Amino acid sequence: MKRIILIISCIAVFSYDCSSQSLTKSQLRGEEAWVLSFGVNTIGSLGTRNPVKDLGDFQFKRPFAFAIQRRWSRIFSIEQDFTMNRFTENTIIDGNPVPDDYNYYSTNTYLKYYVSDDLFRTATWFDVFVGGGIGIFSIDELNTSANIVVGGTFWINQDIGIRLQGIGKFAFNHRDNLFDNNHLQYMLQGVYKF
């Protein structure tokens, strides 16, 4: 865990130092910005099963998602999100029935890398990103995870957009937890840049 935090910190410091030369141009284009997002999420079990085999296994009860992001250059940002959802009684998680209704809470920190300019040089209405980070989540016990995130934002105008993203969460203590295990989370959010 300490190694992951150290690696993410080093990447963030290195990235900030490397991109500090272009901040003036980024500020002129409005790329250095705070971004708020609100929306919904759906969660499902990853485990050893095919994550797209039965999309009905995903939970969508109290699916609130909120995030704040600081984009400090054209290609890098850091984001903190907060989500909640619910697994209902008799839902199956990795083959195990849930005995009662369990609330799902999570908070995650991501370092995102925007690859849009490399993929779509002329498209200013679409941002594609990949990233990674760490998080804390709870279903019936508290657990931590290493996360991989992939997504994109469709910009309606310069400041408002719609974001889709998928997150793979790999629990650190997955062998010791029946329900707080590896899982997928998808988000659909409205985005406001200021």
Image (cartoon, rainbow, N blue to C red):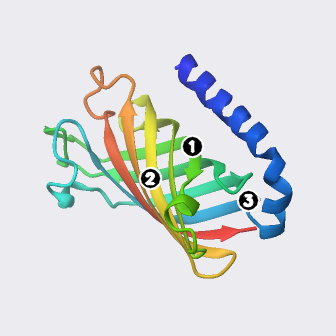
Can residue 54 be seen here? The reply is yes
The local secondary structure at tag 1 comes to strand
Residue placed most toward the observer, 49 or 57: 49
| Mark with earlier residue (2, 1) | 1
Is the residue marked by circle 3 packed among few (<14), some (14-19), or many (20+) residues within 10 Å? some
Q: Are marks 3 and 2 in contact (CB under 8 Å)?
A: no
- Tell us which disc is closer to us: 3 or 2: 2
At mark 2, the secondary structure is: strand
Within the image, what quadrant is residue 68 found in?
Answer: bottom right
Relative side of 84 to 73, left or right? left
Q: Amino acid at mark 2?
A: Val
Q: Residue at x 74, y 51 (%)?
A: 72
Q: In terms of depth relative to the viewer, which is nearer, 97 or 19?
A: 19
User: Along the horizontal axis of the image, is 112 left or right of 9?
Assistant: left
Query: What amino acid type is highlighted by mark number 1?
Result: Tyr
Residue that numbered label 3 is attached to: 34
The residue singled out by tag 1 in the image is 110
Q: Nearer the viewer, mark 2 or mark 1?
A: 2
Q: Residues within 10 Å of mark 2 (few under 14, many from 20)?
A: some
The residue identified by callout 2 is 150
The dot on residue 76 is: none
Q: Earlier in the sequence, mark 3 or mark 1?
A: 3
